Every structure is written in structure tokens, then in C-alpha cells.
Image: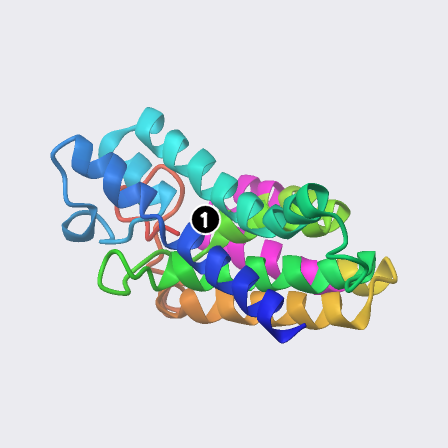
Amino acid sequence: MFLPILIAAVVGYLLGSLPFGYLVARAKGVNIFEVGSKNPGATNVRRVLGHGPGNVVMALDVAKGAAATFAPYGWRLVIGNAAGRFGPEDYGYFAIAGLVGAILGHSFSCFTGFRGGKSVATGAGGFIVLFPPGALIALVVWGATALLFRYVSLASMLAAASLPLSAYFLHRSPVLIGVSVAVAVFVVIRHRTNITRLLAGTEGRLGQKKEETK
């Protein structure tokens, strides 16, 4: 089972590495790594280039996370259960491998010198496939936090933190709970500079040009 998991992780990494933020900005004559927060995430693209390009990047980043996570299920539909070698439960592990690969790929893209974003949108796309109720709860948490406090970074971190709690209280498997914890920790670590600014009271709010983006 190691080889299929490795293949799922590698495919997920390559999908996650697709630098849509960089490519969309480059098409507009902008190197996204040199402007704004110098982050290729959708929020920085939106701030620099406007809502249209930013929303396109957001949709594409979500889509690549979903595709990386769904790919093992698609593989199963095409080739069946590999002559009985794998049961339905095994594909959950393959999907998790694809999701983890996509998150790492987005943050450390091999196409941009291992630079990347904070994997919030890509992770969200993966959890939409892997754990839809948790993804919906995270979306509600994100929206409520952004509306109340107007901090994208805080909303992203709290949304990520809600995933393992949702997995636990909805009685999901220990594996999914563990992966949710790991993803939440990873997202928080990727926002460490934002945390410093939040504590100092200098973090930009939604609508402010100083905002640090995902």
C-alpha cells in the first residue's frame, strides 16, 4: 500500500505546486512575489490586481486542492479496486496523502523556487472532498471571524483550528482527526508573522492595503 500512497502524495504535490497566483499576476505584467505581501495567495492577488483576478486565483487554488484529494477516488472509479487489493477504506488514506501533498505543494512549489502561499484555500478545497461537514463549519467560522474582526489571517487560523474540533465532535476517525490537527498547526505556523502583528496591533484589516494575505 506504500506505493499507491506515495503516488497519491506526489500527484497531490504537483497539483498543489501549480502557481496560479503567480501565473495570473504574471499575465497582468506583475511579479506577485515582489508586490504587496509578496505572497502568491488569492488575497494578495486581489489586493494588488483587484477582485476579478483574486477571485480567479481563489477558485483555482480551491480546485487544485479538491482535485488532489479526489484523484484517488477517481482512480478507483476508473480501474476498480485494483483486482481486490484495496478496499474502500484504503482510498481514504490515498485521499489524505493527496491532500497533504497539495498543501505542501502550494506552500513550497517546485515551480517557483519552493516559495508559495499559506495553503488555506488549497486545504479548504481538499477538506470539501475529504470532510464536507468540517469544511462547511470552517467556512462559517471564517466568515463570522472576518465579519466581526476583519482580520483575514485570524479568520484563516480559526477556521483551520475548527477542523480537528469538528472531526472530534462528529466522531470521525482518529486518522482524520490527526490529519486535521496537523493541517491546523501547519496553517498557524505559516501565519506566524501575522500572529506577531496581531499581538502588536499592527495587522492590517480587510480593506486596508497593509493587509498580510494568505
106 part of magenta stretch? no
Q: Position of residue 76 (x, y in %)?
A: 70, 48
Q: Is 134 placed left or right of 32 in the picture? A: right
Q: Is 203 placed left or right of 27 in the picture? A: right
Q: Is 51 placed left or right of 170 in the picture? A: left
Crowding at label 1, few (<14), some or many (≥20) Cα neighbours within 10 Å? many
Residue matched to label 1: 152
Q: Amino acid at mark 1?
A: Val
Q: Quadrant of residue 160?
A: bottom right
Tell which of 172 and 68 is nearer to you: 68
148 part of magenta stretch? yes
State whether residue 195 appears in this view: no
Please give the range of residues in magenta. Answer: 143-165
Q: Is residue 85 above or below residue 15?
A: below
What kind of element bears circle 1? Answer: helix
Residue found at the far front of this picture: 83
Q: Position of residue 201 (x, y in %)?
A: 37, 61
State whether residue 164 appears in this view: yes
Q: Is 133 placed left or right of 53 in the picture? A: right
Q: Is residue 40 above or below residue 185?
A: above
- Dominant secondary structure of the magenta stretch? helix
Q: Residue at x 65, y 43 (%)?
A: 74
